[in-house]
Amino acid sequence: MKVIRNSFTWVFIFSVAMAFLESAIVIYLRELYYPEGFAFPLKALPGIIAATELFREAATIIMLLAISIIAGKNGAERFAYFLFSFAIWDIFYYIFLKIILGWPASFLTWDILFLLPVSWVGPVIAPILNSLTMILLSLLILHFSSIKKSARIHVREWGLLIIGSLVIIVSYTMDYVSFMLQRFSLIELFSYSDPEKIISYSTHYIPMNFNWTVFIVGQIILFIAIALYGFRNVGQQSS
């Protein structure tokens, strides 16, 4: 239990520090490309900057994976620490931007979340809700891991977690993809067959509609998976 507590503390500190680095980079980019304040449509970044941003996002995920592998002693704990570090990083990213820039103006302010494989956009409250869900699951896993030998997630629970996550990803990408499909085919869009034209056209995109129904369905599926996991482990503990 003490080992988990120590690991938990250091993963938290790492994630908060990483969130500040992320927010610092965004502040620099906004000062350079959005001196009047960030707003859609996005401005086309120079090729080397755009490529660097893509690799930076990939590097961020690798860093979160690395800290989770170091902190956890088995697969379940490593997954829990990855969820926890990702969620803390995401929440504090917005906290630091709010403190330094006064942005976002509200929880319903639109933001660009990821660029891989296409742009993810949504109101700020949506990724925060996802982060809180991830924290809930991670704490359950770490709790059961501290009192029993195995706290692994079963296949049915994994299936629901994956399906729920994919549904939520669809909610983030469907508005952007719908806009881009007015000009490009699905294959052209995801293969980046003509990146200059795709990037040029994407600079006209302004988020218009976030599909809350799809998002909520994804969240419900995740909560079902978490509930199944929690009740199963409580039942095993009491038996």
Image: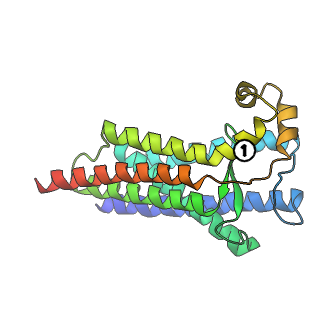
Residue at (76% x, 26% y) in the render:
188
Tell whether 46 sits left or right of 11.
right
Q: Secondary structure at mark 1?
A: helix
On the image, the x and y values in percent for residue 239 come to 10, 53
Quadrant of residue 105 within the rendered picture: bottom right
Residue at (32% x, 43% y) in the render:
153
Res 228 seen here:
yes
Q: Nearer the viewer, residue 36 or 20?
A: 36
Tell whether 190 sits left or right of 225.
right
On the image, the x and y values in percent for residue 59 come to 64, 43
| Quarter occupied by the N terminus | bottom left
Mark 1 crowdedness (10 Å alpha carbons): few <14, some 14-19, many ≥20: many
Quadrant of residue 27 within the rendered picture: bottom right
The residue indicated by pointer 1 is 176
As displayed, is residue 202 above or below residue 2? above
On the image, the x and y values in percent for residue 141 come to 33, 53
Tell whether 17 sits left or right of 44.
left
Res 57 seen here:
no
Residue at (75% x, 45% y) in the render:
53
Q: Nearer the viewer, residue 11 or 49?
A: 49
Q: Amino acid at mark 1?
A: Tyr
On the image, the x and y values in percent for residue 235 come to 17, 53
Q: Nearer the viewer, residue 63 or 95?
A: 95
Color encoding of the figure: rainbow
